[in-house]
Image (cartoon, helix red, strand yellow):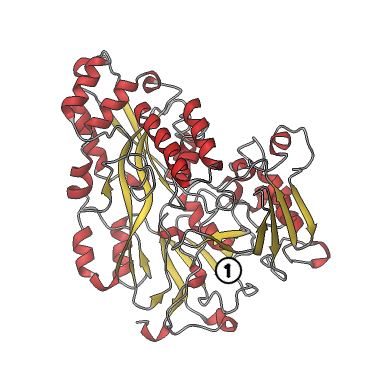
Amino acid sequence: MVKRFTKFMLLLMVLSLVVAVPAGAQDEAPVLRVPMSPDPEHLNPFTATTIAISTVLNQVYEGLVGLDPVSGEPVPRLAESWEVSEDGLVYTFNLRQGVLFHDVEGVEFEDGDREFKAEDWIAAAEYSVTEDETVSSHPEWLESVVGYDEFLAGEADSLSGLNALDDYTIEITLKEPNRLFLFTLGVPGIPQEILPRMSEFANSPVGTGPFQFVEWQRDSFLELKANPDYYEEGKPAIGGVRYINVPDANTALLQYRENELDLLFSFPTGQRLAVIEEFADEYHEAPGLNVRYFGFKMDAGFFADEPLVRQAFAHAFNRELVWDELMEGARFPATLGYLPPSMPASTPAHIYEYNPERAAELLAEAGYPNGEGIPEIDLYVFSTAADELSLPVLQEDLRQLGVTLNIVVEDASTYWDHIGEDDVWFFLSGWSAGINDPSDVFNFLFLDGRDDTHYNNPEVNELLRQAMVEMDEEVRTQLYQQAHDLITADSPWIVSAYSKNTWLQKPWVDGFVPGGGGTYTARLANVTIDTSLLP
């Protein structure tokens, strides 16, 4: 999906020296103005599954650890340190002392004590482990912990592998060694007092992060202010963040020109190169970890039992025309496989290069010569991608095969829930990995039918589970290679593009450093604004 959870998008950067605002003067410090489109669906960390939600919650919540975007390694957050037993099964986290939850009206703490403690985190962890997706979409955060299966099934009152040794020490015992455990431990620090009332706080989050929620006027703005009690001295150095809802890329560009925005993340179609030339000194680019794709529903509808048709569609799509020419290099055309090219095992045995002749042969082999017998296909697209030129190109490419493709644009407020339903057979989506590891694509999109394609291949599942615990890098890469080969043979996607992280940044802004997953991963606590350069 065009989504990515915030479980590991926190940055640890050394900032260059600029004019910063002392922490004590946060109320007078300038506010960073950030474009946002679309609005988040909600602000509940337990059911967060999209970039729009993560954009905001990255700044409000923190977990025990975060990830350094440069090294990709875990770094301290709510836990200031941790130890791992020699057998790799027991993790002991030493919590920071004196970390306070946001001071928010309507949240009453026992004895008025707002300090984050071990029992808060354990309560949130257990809350996340449920099969009820209206409560939590992320039981996988803790699936490697002892007692997970029994707790998920309702056969135990607590998760036996989680223990608070005291207020500031958490011990977690795993069923087996898991090299990715720290990378996927996404449980947020959240007051246990509000867990029974999460529906009340689904749109007004309360965390420990560098910024706290203030106000949300849907389709207009969402405002955060600097957390005056934040534990990192001198941070945040800005007074807050104002996410401004912009209806389209042209409006955002106009607002950036008029100095109404401090950052710009998307460029109007057909104007990309002109915008880069206009703002050459303010343009930034870095490789990304997002994969854009068209997904087939693999357990319902026409495509479920038609692997040759899926392969034909994948060969029919002219990615190079879209991304190199029409979209002016906005992304890299996906000429390899289902993984970003920087990842191990990124080139599978079969590559679906643009080959309309092969596509026609596959359709005929499937029993649909010249597309005869294939029903009209609805391609569902989220509204903010409605002008993406991949859509008319794919539509025309399939028309050349005799297939009619209808583009159905749906508002983002309903899109991400709808595409998981059986009536949606074909849809546009994407995925932003948080780490440069195949697990961060495969485990979320192809393991046990978790994603909206409902892809579920037992052989692939077994390979991915083996790779999760394999410590030898060479052997692990071989496992991922085998899985990648099987997935591409099944063809649950048409891979469209790999991302570039590109943005414009006003000269008075410094310290904005996104990770590979996208610009939304930047840790805004590290941002400073040089007031002497403001217009």
The local secondary structure at tag 1 comes to: loop
> Residue 370: which quarter of the image?
top left
- Quadrant containing the C terminus is bottom left
Using the image as rendered, state which of residue 358 and residue 200 is in the foreground: 358
Q: Position of residue 364 (x, y in %)?
A: 22, 16
Q: Position of residue 500 (x, y in %)?
A: 32, 55
- At 45% from the left and 55% from the top, the residue drawn is 219
Using the image as rendered, state which of residue 111 and residue 161 is in the foreground: 161
Amino acid beneath label 1: Pro
Q: Position of residue 326 (x, y in %)?
A: 18, 48
**What residue is disc 1 on?**
210
Q: Would residue 196 appear left or right of 396 to someone viewing this image?
A: right
- At 60% from the left and 71% from the top, the residue drawn is 227
- Quadrant containing the N terminus is top left
Looking at this rendering, what residue extends furthest in the bottom direction?
532
Q: Position of residue 318 (x, y in %)?
A: 20, 38
